[in-house]
Image (cartoon, grey):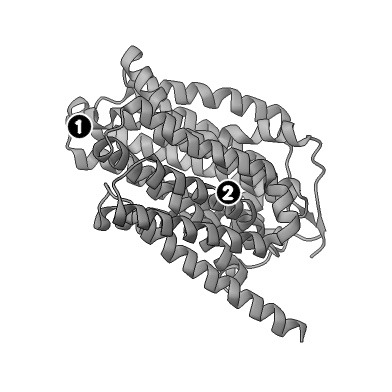
Amino acid sequence: MTINRPIWGHTLPAALLLMAPFDILASLAMDIYLPVVPAMPAILGTNPFVIQLTLSLYMVMLGVGQVLFGPISDRIGRRPVLLAGTLLFAIASLGAASSSTAIPFVTFRLLQAVGASAALVATFATVRDIYADRPEGVVIYGLFSSMLAFVPALGPIAGALIADHFGWRAIFVVLAALSVPAMLNAAFRWHETRPGSQTMQRRSVMPIFSSLPFWTYTLAFSAAMGTFFVFFSTAPRVLIDRAGYSEIRFSITFATVAVVMIVVTRFAKAFVARWGIAGSAARGMGLLLCSAILLGLGEVFGSPSFASFIVPMWVMAAGIVLTASVSANGALAGFNDIAGSAVAFYFCIQSLIVGTVGTLATTMLGGDTAWPLICYATMMAALVSAGLALLRLWDQSSEQ
């Protein structure tokens, strides 16, 4: 099939300003809501388990919903999926704000996740459409990862301040209000990027699942994002409960990890140009393993502190950015004509791995220690390193 790539007239900074809000909103809807979670059972007249569903189901739906919207974006285009998803996100946010009982609230949270997943699919499929073979793609993926590092650090603080001054409903009104300018900007400036073809016939999605590169780099992305998820889940209990940090000191300390990610992103393009996709992923896994060793030494020989917990996370943060900068291009190479479907499965599988394995690690190994982080990073880095080794053997055999 002959692919006609669309023209994308935006500079890299303009493209980032256009795309980034949709990536940030999907994460912010989870994190800005965290401060009011303990009070929600009494507010809505339900039990804590139901409120926990509004967190876990949001995360699962955010990934699983993309399996539906990926093929749809391949068929009807990225732009309509993006706009429809953002509109649903805004409506669902207002619906959650107006809810007075648990069932409508949970329903609107699910719809919010559906809208966010549609917007994410369209955003990352567009990145794949335009920047698949260009060095700017590395910068975009790395910056997205770094921006999302700030959301868990700043989102809860913003949510607490909004709820304290205006009430919990204002949190969801703010989410709706933030989505509107992003949607209007996209309505005027987001051009359709779905590759055209000389025929309407499209490939089956089954080759995606038989692709060793797809699985290897999807696991690499799961290793990177899951490591940060486990860190986000354990850091408050380790630093506040065990190390005695205040909430403000914790927030500032947490933000230093995001700063490291931003700095590494600045040089990611040069690193990838020098080491390539496979070499960058391998070095990212090496950094995760080194950090896991440092965290383990801190747990065995000392108590939680800035030096034993945060400094190793700086090393891990560098590995996360380096891996996330190349994993999408590695996983999605060869699927340009079905990029929406490939992106959807890429994020869905990552979301399921992070949501299940990351949660199990935190629950079973104790959320007030570094052991969940150590075990998750070590296990995932070992799996990805094995996959990269198989890819090297496969490439060598193909050349002979």
In the foreground, 9 or 145: 145
Q: Residue 41, labelled with which disc? A: 1
Residue occupying image coordinates x 24% and y 33%: 102
Find residue 202 and report its horizontal and vertical position in percent: 69, 63
Residue 58 in view of the camera? no
Find residue 13 and report its horizontal and vertical position in percent: 73, 32
Find residue 246 and report its horizontal and vertical position in percent: 31, 27
What kind of residue is marked 2?
Val
Residue occupying image coordinates x 37% and y 28%: 249
Per the image, label 1 sits on a secondary structure element best described as: helix
Q: Residues within 10 Å of mark 2 (few under 14, many from 20)?
A: many
Q: Is residue 202 above or below residue 251?
A: below
In the foreground, 185 or 225: 225
- In front of the other: label 2 or label 1? 2
**Which residue is farthest bottom?**
400
Residue occupying image coordinates x 54% and y 43%: 118
Q: Which image quadrant: the N terminus?
A: bottom right
Image check: 52 left or right of 29?
A: left
Per the image, label 2 sits on a secondary structure element best described as: helix
Q: Quadrant of residue 293?
A: bottom left
Q: Quadrant of residue 391?
A: bottom right
Find residue 182 and report its horizontal and vertical position in percent: 60, 27
In the foreground, 161 or 262: 262
Q: Residue 321, labelled with which disc? A: 2
